[in-house]
Image (cartoon, grey):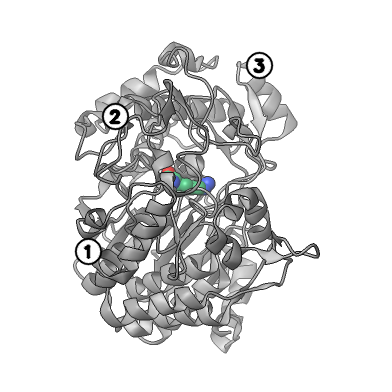
Amino acid sequence: MRAHRKTWWSVALSLLVVAMPAWAARPYRGGAVATAHPMASEAALRMLDKGGNAVDAAVAAAFTLAVVGPYHSGLGGGGFALVHDAKTSGTQVLDFREVAPKAATRDMYLKDGQVVPGLSTDGATSVAVPGAVAGYLELLEKHGKLPRAVVLQPAIEAARNGFWVSPKYQALATLRRDCLRQDPEAARIFLAKNEQGELDVPPIGHLVRQPELARTLQTLAKSGPKPFYSGPIAQAMVDTVKAGGGVLSLEDLKDFKTRAHAPLEGSYRGHRILTMPPPSAGGLAVVQVLGALERLRPQGLEFREPETLHLYTEAVRRVYVDRVKYLGDPAFVKIPMESLTSSGYIADLAGSIDPKKATPSASLLPPVEGASGSTLKKPDGTWYDPSSAPEKKNTTHISIIDKNGNAVALTTTVNYAFGSCLVAKGTGILLNDEMDDFAALPGVPNAYGLVTGEANAIAPGKVPLSSMSPTLVFSKEDPKKVMLAVGSPGGSTIPTTVIQVISNLVDHKMDVVRAVGQGRLHHQYLPDELWVDRWGLEAATQAALEAKGHKIRRQEAWGDAEAVYSDPKTNLRYAASDPRNEGAALGQD
Ligand code: DON
């Protein structure tokens, strides 16, 4: 593989790296990529090697991930991308997230005023109108250089030849086994016969081949997005969803449109930051929390110091309260973005933090009275406590900076593991369950334990609120030059992952590999708990935080951040695929 070839130059650089422990990661002189699957990173690198730019590489990776990571993303999903063009210094935002079908109603997941667990997470009733195909192909058409057939070729090959089942695939297929078994098509493709002859989680090494998906991809390579939104593929999706009791229609698909937004701008210690505006709640959290931290600690943050972690937690708690109060699809609700990102507002937010003790979440915003349960179903039909969910590292992120400094940060998802577990018959397309990102009933937590408010209630054509936070950080010396492309999966923990990776680089001067691999902390207003991963806290620090009133819960599952760092001084690039996952960071020598 290209990335492992040693040249005199890379040997010399590795010697240099030994002498400079701050930059322990492998440097690349050309473009660099980080994705959650080696085959996707290789697809991206192949495009760069063919003379493609960051967008060609990102789109090749996105289509490949749709094949090899059905548990996190796919043609039946949607997402967000930030694209930076080094020539014009402009950054574009494309929003190709799913929308609610026209026949969706505010109360569609309720019975007798209560949420019915599973309706918004499993099967036909959970499916929103897919946007990924429109989004990926629009990115390519507007910003790419290579022909569509070339860019889709790695995905077609992966679908035809197969990929092998990994420990991660097994873990997520186990989580969704019952759901997958509900749809014979999904079970046939994603499960395998066990010794008893039942379709079950496949063994490690089992080859997943998807000939129908290969055919669908070939059609897209030849004809573009049209057949997906109005041709036979559209018909297959509609028929499958309707047969399962869902409401997707041909009009929904025909009328689907991507949206362009201006990037949300913030800054951290002199670095310009561009991130995702609503309908993501993530970018606002990034801008507000980093803004508050800079105000509270103008001299910088001390690593893992309890007072600092307390301030961070309190800032995050407040930002997630704002999420409940104000955020939803900006085409449907008026969001006071100017005020929420103003320095006065951020100063007030920082100033409201008591440095001595934790503020009970309920005192900031009382939880909705009588709201109980969750949208996530246990096998016995009762609801599941999402904050204790064992494994939720789905969704996926692609970070790329090419040799010319063009950059892409693209986060894409089918939502929960294996989306709705429903495959549109004959097409290989696994459909999303993005409807669960709406507030099924304001106050009742979704699959990520997230509570959202009235602004995120279901309405036809509306985009469900997201946590996905693709982000670009620019060089201090040259605010037009991308220094970091970053993003992550992880549901509600996505924004705090992005915040911590940025802080690790900027405050703690970590190399990008260390910055993504570090332990993490997360709060989300409700449940009123500070989530900490295995490497998040030393015992003494934990005790100091508990003494301030924080209720700490250890979580084992966190999103895998994917990041590319471009050193503004040397112009060398460094890529990091989180060691929590099975991805790969590659680059051009
Ligand atoms: O858009 C969102 O916020 C969610 N659909 C993301 C889902 C996700 O990250 C799943 N992984 N934990």
Circle 2 packing at 10 Å, graded few (<14), some (14-19), many (20+), is many
Question: Residue at image x 62%, y 38%?
Answer: 389
Residue 132 position within the rendered picture, expressed as x and y whole percent measured from the top left: 35, 61
Q: How many marks?
A: 3
Dividing the picture into quadrants, the one containing residue 58 is bottom left
> Left or right: 419 with respect to 466?
right
Tell me the CA gap for discs 1 and 2.
34 Å
Question: Residue at image x 35%, y 72%?
Answer: 54
Q: Amino acid at mark 1?
A: Ser
Tell me the CA gap for discs 1 and 3.
48 Å
For the residue pair 278 and 161, the one nearer the viewer reads as 161
Mark sitting on residue 547 = 3
- In this rendering, which labeled residue sits more in front, label 3 or label 2? 2
Dot placed on the residue nearer the N-terminal end, 3 or 2: 2
> Left or right: 378 with respect to 142?
right
For the residue pair 305 and 363, the one nearer the viewer reads as 363
- In this rendering, which labeled residue sits more in front, label 1 or label 2? 2
Quarter of the image that includes the N terminus:
bottom right
Dot placed on the residue nearer the N-terminal end, 1 or 3: 1
Q: Does mark 3 have its CB less than 8 Å from ligand 1? A: no
Q: Which residue is mark 2?
A: 455
Residue 75 seen in the current view = yes
Secondary structure at badge 1 equals: loop
Image position of 12 with respect to 466: above or below? below
For the residue pair 233 and 475, the one nearer the viewer reads as 233
Residue 545 position within the rendered picture, expressed as x and y whole percent measured from the top left: 63, 23
Residue 126 position within the rendered picture, expressed as x and y whole percent measured from the top left: 43, 45
Mark sitting on residue 444 = none
Question: Residue at image x 34%, y 54%?
Answer: 80
Q: Which residue is mark 1?
A: 89
Q: Which residue of the protein is positioned furthest toward the front in this rendering?
A: 243
Residue 571 position within the rendered picture, expressed as x and y whole percent measured from the top left: 40, 70
